[in-house]
Amino acid sequence: MNVKILRAALLLIVLIAAALPSDPLRAVQPQPLVVDIKLNMMIHQVSAEYVERGIRYANEQNADAVLLEINTPGGLVSSTQELVQAIYASHAPVITYVTPSGASAASGGFFVLLAGDLAVMAPGTNTGASHPVDLLGGQGDKTMNEKIESDLASYIRSIAQKRGRNVALADDAVRKSASFTDKEALDDKLIDAVAGSPREIFARYDGKTVQRFNGTTTTLHLADADVKTYPMTRIESILVWVADPNIAFLLGAIGLACIYLEFTHPGMVAPGVVGAIALVLALYAFNFLPINYAGVLLIITALALFALEAKLTSHGVLAAGGIVAMVLGAMILIKSPWPEARIHLPTALSVALPLGAITVILLQFAIVAKRRKAVTGEAGMIGLIGVAQTDLDPTGEIRVHGELWKARTSGRIPQGSRVRVREIEGLTLVVESAPETR
């Protein structure tokens, strides 16, 4: 009996061994995980928080690598520094990748690209042009601007030196606004590779060793990696949409129009609420952008010209001037060399024309209403024509609007004569003679 049991056990072991693969260690090897984060927007507080959270998520999931896809015109220096620090602190190697073809890693994006453990660009992309933009719209102190430039130049040099990249050209990108194509960046050792897709990167660097920021080395295991995209939250997506300069300008215009409507038509409530929300969102967005105050002054001038058009007879000259000032102000409002970070001409026109028309029309209505004689209450009695029901010498009765009133005059008015109301004293009307008009 024991022999039969032993034979059955041996047979079971043989069957299990036959069913196992020849390399059991490979069979239990988990599939590599790469967390994909997309920085395809301006660099500001919202995008920086999203990327930082994505890197933390990758570390919590013990990901083999983070793929940070970049397509940005740059943004705030403080947010750029936060991104660089998050890349440095990541336990998982971070691959910074400028993609797709036609994309750019400009300004702050250049800092982020060079900070990666692997810096890669897709064919047909560019990077660089990282000279700091004057946030004071050209009004900043020259010495202060030079200090900012020097500080950022030393910062990019430290990144390039730590990552073994071309320090001199990295400095030129800040001081001289130098830009580089993917081929130039590769030939000049600013990046590690040019690749057409993430899979090409994974295949090329699978099994390769990279040096981390802290001096340690890590061997990459990226073949057949499971790429998991880390999405933005809904509120982050909305805030990123609001932070677009064109959307921010539209919201600001809507906010001004609604607030103006509320002031000219008190008690409507809804325009005031909508206008307040739109203005707050617009100010939130403009907080992230380098504002040119000459543009702000032009927009204020445009609003003043719209108001004057409603009060003065200029035959449209003031309104036309307001529209031109509004369009020019919008076009130079954002001080950025990159089209993606500026307000486009169609957006400026779509705001200036309707806003000018609405402002002029509403203000005209308000002026007409203010000048119109009251037609109700005591004030509405002034100037009305009535008929003397008795002799006024100097007091008596008159009929106005089908009603009998006590009346007083300065002289004598015979019964049946026409009278005009000049004043109201309590319940007595002060009248004067109103001859028949022929």
Image: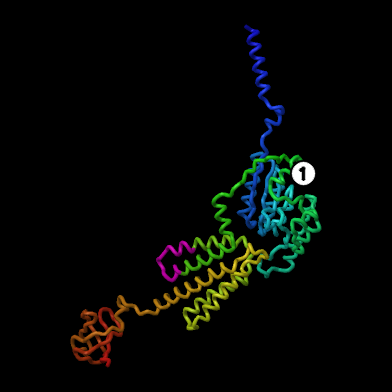
Residue 111 lies within the magenta run: no
Q: Position of residue 291 (x, y in %)?
A: 63, 66
Find residue 272 and report its image quarter.
bottom left
Q: Name the image quarter holding the C terminus.
A: bottom left
Q: Residue at x 69, y 49 (%)?
A: 197
The picture quadrant where one finds residue 205 is top right
> Dividing the picture into quarters, in which one does residue 248 lie?
bottom right
Judged left or right of residue 85, residue 415 is left
Considering only vertical position in the picture, is 427 above or below 286? below
Local crowd size for mark 1, using a 10 Å CA cut-off: few (<14), some (14–19), many (≥20): some
Q: Which residues are magenta?
A: 261-275
Q: Is disc 1 placed on a helix, strand or loop?
A: strand
Instruction: Establish if 383 lies above or below 121.
Output: below
**Left/right of residue 205 with respect to residue 350 in the rendered view:** right
Which one is in front, 397 or 364?
364
Identify the residue at the far top of this view: 1
Front-most of residues 205 and 433: 205
Which residue is at a point 28% across and 83% down the rendered structure image?
384
Badge 1 amino acid: Val
Q: Is residue 158 visible?
A: no
* Residue sitting at x 64%, y 48%: 37
Does the magenta segment cover residue 263?
yes
Whether residue 420 sits left or right of residue 168 in the image: it is left
From the viewer's perspective, is residue 437 above or below residue 218?
below
Q: How is the image coloured?
A: rainbow
The residue that disc 1 covers is 210
